[in-house]
Amino acid sequence: MTADAPVVLVIEDEPQLRRFLRAALGSSYRLLEASTAREAEQLAPSHNPDLFLLDLGLPDGDGVDVARRLREWTHAPIIVLSARGREEDKVRALDAGADDYLTKPFGVAELLARMRVALRHSSKTDSGALEPVEVGPLRVDLVRREVTVDGREVRLTPTEYKLLSLFARHAGKVITHGQLLRDVWGPHATEVHVARVHVAELRKKIEADPARPRLLVTEPGVGYRLRDRIEDA
């Protein structure tokens, strides 16, 4: 492990899982560990982690509240690791500021892939450069407001472009229905079916097979994700 390896704060009260994460991640990341919300909120500001792995069921508080408080001062990715598999738990965590969500038990390979995606996205965001986003045959140039598939220009409606640019700026990250409605249609929008209709129309223009999307995928009951890389499909 190099001295510039990303710092990861693991916020988890189960000793067995902390040991598992230590063994799985210790060669690539510098790990910090906290077993309570209080300990995490003391460690985080002084070490400024590059990424958080957060359990929701902490002994002294709800991980959703921890995510919300972290988001008040850091943009570092937060990946939730939780035994709670209900859609409403995922939505609450993501709406509170989490970037991704893995339900226990999970595989090491999937966790490492999600961490790489989150850190790539964070690096692009921090750079401030609006570089074109390329996912397989799709290319979104956010500066020129141009969209191409296999090199051919795709003409989108203003709403479709607003949707796609939101997904592109957060490629690899889940965008909840609530986030989608707020960012595209405004803070008072509540009609999820409107978003579904526009996403379906957008898929017709960017997907080879809109019925089996490989670029813009559905997170059931939660929202959508523009894949970071097509090989993840």
Image: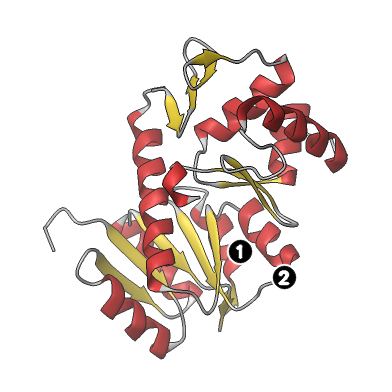
Extreme residue toward the front, this view: 209
Q: Is residue 141 above or below residue 225?
A: above
Instruction: Specify the label residue 194 is tagged with.
Output: none
Mark 1 and mark 2 lie on one chain; the one further toward the N terminus is: 1
Q: Which residue is mark 1?
A: 65
Residue at screen point 48% across, 60% down: 79
Give the side of residue 183 with respect to residue 132, left or right: right
Q: Amino acid at mark 2?
A: Arg
Count all numbered tags in the image, as a single digit: 2
Q: Amino acid at mark 1?
A: Asp
Q: Is residue 75 visible?
A: no
Q: Nearer the viewer, mark 1 or mark 2?
A: 2
Residue 43, image x, y percentages: 35, 67
Q: Is residue 106 above or below residue 41?
A: below
The residue closer to the viewer here, 178 or 114, is 114
Q: Which residue is mark 2?
A: 86
The residue closer to the viewer here, 73 or 109, is 109
Q: Secondary structure at mark 2?
A: loop
Residue 54, image x, y percentages: 48, 68
Extreme residue toward the top, this view: 144
* Disc 1 + disc 2, Cβ < 8 Å: no
Residue 87, image x, y percentages: 73, 64
Q: CA distance from mark 1 to mark 2?
A: 17 Å
Q: Quadrant of the N terminus?
A: bottom left
Residue at screen point 33% across, 53% down: 50
The residue closer to the viewer here, 156 or 61, is 156
Q: Is residue 98 above or below residue 9?
A: above
Q: Is residue 211 visible?
A: yes
